[in-house]
Amino acid sequence: MLKSAEDIRTEIPALPTIGLILGSGLGDLADEIKNCTTISYSQIKGFPELSVKGHDGDLVIGELAGKVVVAMRGRSHYYEHRDMSKIAFPVRFMKKMGISSLIVTNACGGINPKLYPGGLMVISDHINLMGDNPLLGPNRDEEGPRFPDMSQPYSSRLRKVAKECATNINLPLSEGIYSAVSGPNYLSKAELRMVRFMGSDTIGMSTVPEVIVANHLALEVLGISCVTDMAIPESLTPLTHEEVIATANEAKPKFSALVKAIIKEI
């Protein structure tokens, strides 16, 4: 029998207050959650299936850095389903489980030449280039307004906490703008020049739909990108998904240290 959010709430000893969406190659942080309950997405009513390497497909609920969290070990992408409702569902599901804050992570390409592979960036704002929006269609009035404000999609308070935590553990942390495209292909040189002209520091294929839904639900959001490759048009070289995962794997220790430090402070 497939489980609902209400079913899972009755099965766990404490309700989570923080949600984590763990992007490509970053899912191992879920292994550090203590006293956990692990549920495969396939056991949850409505959860979309995953098809991309580096995304395991488990919901892990338990204790991390002194807080009760619910972590998504892997996410669905728009290019897998062409259905924004599937991308929005997990965020709405975690809200029903009790979260008030959401930390969303991703692996991305670095457009700003000051970035570097393996570096981390806290997201200050985003540009939606996916050609779709998870709030299209009838509004869910019980969840949020028809026209949600997006002037601060990423919490200034949580960004400040993230930067302070990075300083305390002596970890370099950039801040910048993330752009999302539908994928699944990587961008051409001309497209990268366009995105750079628009003011983006990084480029990826996720995060923005989830953040739009989180803002509609009045969740406090923090976004962290792991730069896995440099997407600079003048020096662009062929890229594979395996290379992206390899760089994300190398960044795991500092990524985990930062996220745990942040969770402890919020």
Image (cartoon, rainbow, N blue to C red):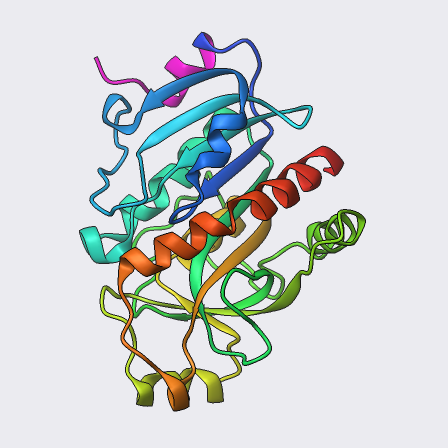
Q: Quadrant of the C terminus?
A: top right
Residue 182, relative to residue 74: is it above or below? below
Count of numbered labels shown in the rendering: 0
- Classified by dominant secondary structure, the portion drawn in magenta counts as helix
Q: Nearer the viewer, residue 177 or 131?
A: 177
Answer with the quarter of the image where residue 98 lies: top right
Which residue is found at the position 32% from the left and 47% from the top? Answer: 87
Q: Nearer the viewer, residue 38 or 215?
A: 38
Return the x and y of residue 212 as percentages of the image width and height: 46, 55
Q: Nearer the viewer, residue 233 or 159?
A: 233
Q: Quadrant of the N terminus?
A: top left
In the image, is residue 9 part of the stretch drawn in magenta? yes
Residue 167 visible in image: yes
Which residue is found at the position 69% from the left and 24% from the top? Answer: 66
Residue 218 visible in image: no
Return the x and y of residue 127 as percentages of the image width and height: 46, 71
In the displayed structure image, the side of residue 143 where residue 175 appears, left or right: right
In the image, is residue 67 part of the stretch drawn in magenta? no
Residue 166, relative to residue 193: is it above or below? above
Which residue is found at the position 75% from the left and 37% from the top? Answer: 265
Return the x and y of residue 208 as percentages of the image width and height: 43, 59
Q: Nearer the viewer, residue 238 or 131?
A: 238
In the displayed structure image, the side of residue 265 where residue 22 appears, left or right: left
Residue 29, relative to residue 159: is it above or below? above
In the displayed structure image, the side of residue 185 where residue 64 appears, left or right: right
In the displayed structure image, the side of residue 179 where residue 66 appears, left or right: right
Answer with the quarter of the image where residue 74 lies: top left
Return the x and y of residue 91 as percentages of the image width and height: 43, 40
Which residue is found at the position 57% from the left and 47% from the top? Answer: 255
Q: From which residue to which does the magenta span run?
A: 1-10
